[in-house]
Amino acid sequence: MEAEDKVSLKKIGEIQFTKAENVVGVVYNSKSSSTKLRWTRSVGGLGKLKGEASVRSVLKMVEAKVISEPAFQKPRSRVRKPVSQP
């Protein structure tokens, strides 16, 4: 995690709990290496998620409401109508 201010609180198993303020980025790599994601803050609390994810990871993120289903829907093609000349 990349943040302006962070303090490690406790580690349970392989999970490290951290208190952070003004998070600017998060990197996640799964044990199997089938998922490699990087989130970077862009405006306010919003950000951009980039990388490769397994289907299972995507489903888990949708279930946890980390990302929304519409983010994975195929965009509609935009067909422009010709402008009529007078």
Image: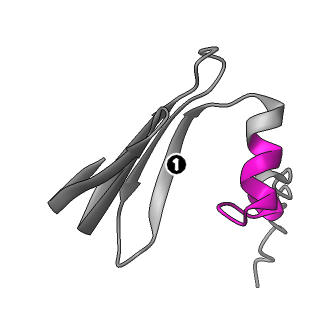
Q: Main secondary structure of the magenta part?
A: helix
Protein image colouring: one colour
Frontmost residue, 79 versus 5? 5
Q: What secondary structure is marked by label 1?
A: strand
> Which residue position holds label 1?
49
Total number of numbered discs in the rendering: 1
**Where on the picture, by quarter, is residue 76?**
bottom right
Q: Is residue 11 above or below residue 21?
A: above
Q: Is residue 7 magenta?
A: no
**Residue 65 inside the magenta-drawn segment:** yes
Location of residue 75 in the rendering, given as x and y in whole percent from the top left corner:
81, 55
Return the residue nearer the eye: 39 or 14. Answer: 14
Left or right side of 10 for 64: right
Mark 1: amino acid:
Leu
- Looking at the picture, how far across and down is residue 46, in whole percent? 45, 71
Task: Choose between 10 and 23: the one closer to the eye.
Answer: 10
Task: Categorize mark 1 by other alpha carbons within 10 Å: few (<14), some (14-19), many (20+).
Answer: some
Q: Position of residue 24 (x, y in %)?
A: 27, 58
Query: Which residue is depicted at the point 31% across and 56% down?
Result: 18
For the C terminus, the quadrant is bottom right
Which range of residues does the magenta coloring cover?
Answer: 58-71
Along the viewing direction, whichever of 19 and 10 lies nearer the viewer: 10
